[in-house]
């Protein structure tokens, strides 16, 4: 603003908007000192405050919570001012603050001072004190008895006070940066000052134009978000939590069964009732009199040569003479001679032994188990040491897990014997040879599909959704499978069966929903992999969005309110937008066929929910369909809104519609389409006008499905999920079939189809008057033929120009040797160039067992791109994962385009290790895959 007469210019800068520039420069008012006569007060008492005024002026004193509850303005002189502030009766808050503002003039210039001080209430009567008697050293494999005394219990809470105890591995506490929450502070600690302090003085008189003071009062803390830790290596640990125990007469006794663990544990004792809380935290040493530990690799590969380190530490208080024995299970060969049979240790003495071993190749077991035994040779019965401990680590194959199928029509009284030829070309694991599926009619197997979904290792939005489908059904056969699969997983981890630990169907569905949540974009749609939450629709996958929304609706129907309301509403609104604005929606789709398939699916889902009308469906204007499934979805949509004539016309036209192409980003195939069509037709059969035609088409599709699914060795999760649902339907339709069969000489009677584990020599005899259908599914790792080159390998069905790895030192020079030192880091570059387009490709490179992947997200300052050698330009993958044993990329690959991806390896464990091949596949056309071996087979890590 300019004065025209004097030409004086007054300028005030400001910003109006939402983004960059909205923050003004911070200003700090001059401080006003406030002192109280007590540190804490009770409601109804008076606060005697002393406020030191640096100048004479007007003093405004206020008592505030989320509002002003008392205020007083006083004219004051320079110096100490005594002011009494009343605390209202019944004040039960912990965000009480006293603020004081002094304004005046110094040298004819305005001045202001500001002070703030928390008013803390006395809550000591609400705090319980705890005393516990814990031994200085807790012994593993014993029952720890903890006597606890609780003081300060209110009389009315004598019969309502409880105590819980937790004991957790201190290593996990430190790695996760867990800070135990104090329940007393959680309820009664001072809360932050919630008001904005607007300092008009700085706007009017100060050259620092920031009217908002930055309050830093109170004790509320922001949860740390920098805690990023990769999957922890499986090891012996302790995580215990007791049930609540009632405190009687101020005392309680808690017992904890201490597992096989040596180390340090954090003991947290918490006591509570309706009005009081208390907590006690301590760190406690957990150790046997003689600590015996093994250090083993995180995983192994068939053919590896490595070593285990045996550590023995005597802390018993006396000298110990021990016998030593180390053993391993089948498939692992130890150099036992390097471990002495006897050792004598003085108190406090520690010894270590390095014992080499080799892993059999081909693979014969999927876990290596090492057992260490140490026993006292002393005759002193009071000082006996008996140690018998086991450690396990997975043994992995570098070749893919594959299936071999064989079907038999077993005539009445005919006997079938399973021979070794079923597994020809496979390296097998004795307890995982596959299954025989037996039924009286050609049927799809529920368990076959559920088992493969359960074992699938990756988790994009589609895979997460498909893998959760078995938990939407209560089929008895599925329930038995879930229990057996959970027990098998515990067994693989070296844990005992524990029915109480088995997650419920609701738990599994909830976990799937939480995994899907980061994949929902701000518009409500879903991307294939986790998004930043603010992505535009360019990241949305229309067909996938409908598929996930369909799942969320079904999950919420089975388990009411399990889906967060906002998540479900946004998803429904997004697919409703597809149907309401089909022209706009086609702009977001991969192509016309992808858009049409998403539109018909969205119409089908929304019509089931009653969210669209006939006009919405008709306005889609679809005349040509990308697949028969899409046409059936539209027919069902019309039927759902009451137009059976339209639905019947579409049904009559079904056989003229062929799938437009093998793939158009609908994650589908002919097999998937047929399986989902069977489900829609089952629904249409309930309409009397459509029943006959729907049943006719469904019968034909079911026959095709049984034949086609039995011939396909490679199926996607989308195909498995669709087949699972179709199989459940066929099982319900044939649930009453009864038949007699003899398995390995044992007579059995069954109602409905069933499966049995395969073994070589298994016999199945049909004792019925009708034939039995037997499907044998042999399983194992594909054998490698080293004489066949990568390009000539008939198993490699992808058209590959280049699929290779290059290894560099950190200075950018090529690494050409086969030996590295422990701690040395190498940069690995994967080079990909294909002679075909691959949609939703999966590139997986397993690392040698003695190395560790360096994850840039966990290693601040690690810039892999900056380490790339000159001339190598790294590609930005759509999704990447740093797993315990492999580096994974998900990416669509264009034809004849070069891609380079890099990761960093650090040598960790001495030994000689197999260098695994590069595996690549199209996730939704998995019959297109390739396994490419490097020229160098082994790498050695030295100390």
Image (cartoon, rainbow, N blue to C red):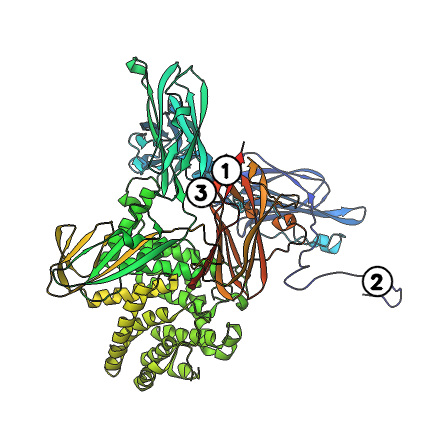
The mark that comes first in sequence, 2 or 3, is 2
Mark carried by residue 187: 3
How much space separates mark 2 and mark 3, taking CA atoms? 55 Å
Q: Is residue 122 visible?
A: no
Q: Is residue 423 visible?
A: yes
How much space separates mark 2 and mark 1, taking CA atoms? 54 Å
Q: Position of residue 733 (x, y in %)?
A: 21, 68
The mark that comes first in sequence, 3 or 1, is 1
Q: Nearer the viewer, residue 345 or 79?
A: 345
Mark 2 burial class by Cα count in 10 Å: few <14, some 14-19, many 20+: few
Q: Position of residue 11 (x, y in %)?
A: 79, 61
Residue at mark 2:
9
Image quarter (top left, top right, bottom left or bottom right) of the C terminus: top right
The mark that comes first in sequence, 2 or 1, is 2
Mark 3: secondary structure: helix
Left or right: 914, with 23 as reference point? left
Residue at 74% over, 52% down: 208
Mark 2: secondary structure: loop
Mark 1: secondary structure: loop
265 relative to 341, above or below: below
Q: Quadrant of residue 291?
A: top left
Residue at mark 1:
41
Q: Position of residue 938 (x, y in %)?
A: 50, 42
């Amino acid at each position: 603003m300019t004065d025209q007469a004097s030409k004086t210019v007054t300028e005030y800068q400001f910003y109006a908007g939402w983004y960059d520039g909205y923050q003004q420069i911070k200003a700090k008012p001059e401080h006003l000192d406030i002192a109280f006569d007590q540190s804490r007060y009770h409601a109804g008492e008076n606060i005697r405050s002393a406020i030191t005024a640096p100048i004479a002026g007007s003093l405004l004193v206020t008592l505030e919570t989320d509002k002003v509850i008392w205020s007083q303005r006083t004219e004051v002189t320079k110096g100490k001012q005594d002011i009494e502030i009343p605390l209202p009766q019944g004040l039960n808050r912990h965000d009480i603050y006293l603020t004081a503002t002094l304004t005046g003039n110094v040298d004819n210039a305005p001045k202001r001072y500001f002070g703030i001080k928390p008013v803390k209430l006395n809550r000591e009567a609400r705090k319980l004190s705890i005393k516990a008697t814990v031994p200085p050293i807790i012994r593993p494999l014993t029952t720890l008895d903890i006597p606890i005394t609780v003081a300060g219990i209110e009389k009315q809470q004598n019969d309502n006070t409880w105590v819980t105890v937790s004991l957790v591995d201190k290593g996990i506490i430190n790695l996760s940066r867990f800070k135990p929450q104090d329940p007393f502070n959680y309820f009664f600690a001072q809360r932050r000052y919630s008001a904005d302090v607007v300092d008009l003085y700085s706007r009017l008189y100060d050259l620092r134009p920031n009217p908002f003071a930055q309050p830093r009062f109170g004790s509320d803390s922001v949860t740390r978000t920098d805690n990023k830790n990769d999957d922890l290596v499986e090891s012996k640990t302790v995580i215990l939590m007791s049930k609540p125990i009632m405190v009687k007469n101020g005392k309680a006794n808690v017992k904890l069964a201490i597992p096989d663990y040596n180390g340090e544990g954090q003991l947290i004792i918490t006591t509570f009732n309706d009005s009081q809380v208390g907590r006690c935290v301590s760190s406690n040493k957990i150790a046997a009199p003689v600590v015996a530990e093994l250090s083993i690799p995180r995983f192994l590969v068939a053919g590896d040569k490595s070593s285990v380190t045996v550590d023995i530490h005597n802390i018993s208080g006396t000298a110990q003479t021990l016998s030593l024995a180390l053993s391993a299970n089948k498939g692992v060969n130890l150099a036992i001679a390097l471990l002495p049979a006897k050792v004598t240790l003085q108190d406090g003495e520690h010894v270590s032994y390095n014992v080499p071993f080799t892993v059999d190749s081909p693979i014969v077991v999927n876990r290596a188990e090492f057992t260490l035994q140490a026993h006292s040779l002393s005759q002193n019965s009071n000082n006996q040491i008996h140690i018998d401990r086991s450690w396990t680590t997975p043994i992995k194959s570098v070749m893919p897990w594959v299936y071999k199928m064989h079907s038999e029509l077993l005539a009445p009284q005919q006997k079938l014997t399973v021979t070794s030829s079923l597994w020809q070309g496979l390296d097998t694991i004795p307890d995982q040879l596959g299954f025989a599926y037996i039924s009286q009619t050609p049927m799809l197997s529920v368990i076959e599909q559920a088992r493969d979904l359960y074992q699938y290792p990756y988790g994009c939005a589609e895979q997460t959704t498909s893998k959760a489908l078995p938990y939407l059904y209560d089929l008895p056969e599925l329930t038995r499978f879930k229990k057996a699969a959970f027990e098998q997983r515990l067994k693989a981890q070296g844990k005992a069966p524990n029915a109480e630990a088995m997650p419920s169907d609701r738990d599994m569905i909830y976990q799937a929903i939480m995994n899907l949540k980061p994949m929902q974009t701000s518009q409500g749609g879903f991307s294939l992999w986790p998004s930043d939450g603010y992505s535009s629709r360019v990241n949305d996958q229309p067909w996938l969005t409908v598929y996930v929304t369909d799942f969320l609706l079904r999950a919420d129907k089975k388990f009411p309110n399990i889906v967060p309301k906002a998540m479900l509403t946004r998803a429904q609104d997004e697919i409703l937008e597809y149907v309401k604005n089909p022209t706009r929606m086609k702009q977001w789709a991969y192509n016309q066929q992808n858009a049409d398939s998403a539109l018909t699916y969205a119409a089908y889902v929304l019509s089931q929910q009653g969210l669209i009308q006939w006009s919405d469906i008709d306005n889609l204007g679809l005349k040509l369909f990308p697949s028969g499934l899409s046409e059936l979805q539209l027919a069902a949509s019309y039927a759902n809104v009451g137009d059976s004539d339209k639905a019947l016309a579409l049904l009559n036209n079904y056989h003229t519609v062929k799938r437009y192409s093998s793939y158009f980003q609908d994650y589908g195939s002919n097999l998937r389409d047929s399986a989902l069509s069977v489900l829609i037709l089952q629904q249409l059969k309930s309409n009397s006008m459509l029943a006959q035609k729907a049943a006719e088409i469904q019968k034909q599709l079911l026959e095709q499905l049984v034949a086609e699914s039995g011939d396909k060795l490679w199926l996607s999760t989308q195909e498995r999920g669709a087949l699972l649902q179709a199989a459940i339907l066929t099982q319900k339709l044939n649930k009453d079939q009864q038949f007699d069969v003899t398995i390995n000489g044992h007579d059995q009677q069954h109602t409905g189809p069933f499966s049995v584990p395969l073994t070589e020599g298994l016999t199945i005899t049909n004792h019925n008057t009708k034939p039995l259908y037997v499907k044998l599914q042999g399983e194992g790792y594909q054998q490698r033929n080293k004489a066949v080159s990568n390009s000539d390998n008939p198993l490699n069905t992808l058209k590959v120009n280049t699929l290779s790895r290059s290894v560099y030192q950190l200075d950018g020079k090529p690494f050409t040797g086969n030996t590295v030192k422990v701690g040395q880091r190498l940069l690995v570059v994967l080079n990909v160039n294909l002679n075909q387009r691959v949609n939703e490709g999966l590139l997986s490179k397993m690392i040698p067992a003695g190395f560790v992947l360096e994850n840039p997200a966990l290693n601040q300052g690690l810039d892999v791109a900056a380490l790339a050698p000159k001339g190598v330009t790294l590609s930005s993958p759509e999704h990447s994962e740093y797993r315990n044993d492999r580096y994974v990329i998900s990416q669509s690959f264009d034809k004849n385009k070069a891609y380079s991806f890099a990761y960093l390896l650090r040598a960790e464990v001495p030994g000689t290790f197999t260098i695994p091949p590069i595996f690549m596949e199209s996730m939704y056309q998995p019959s297109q895959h390739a396994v490419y071996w490097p020229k160098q087979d082994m790498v050695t890590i030295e100390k």
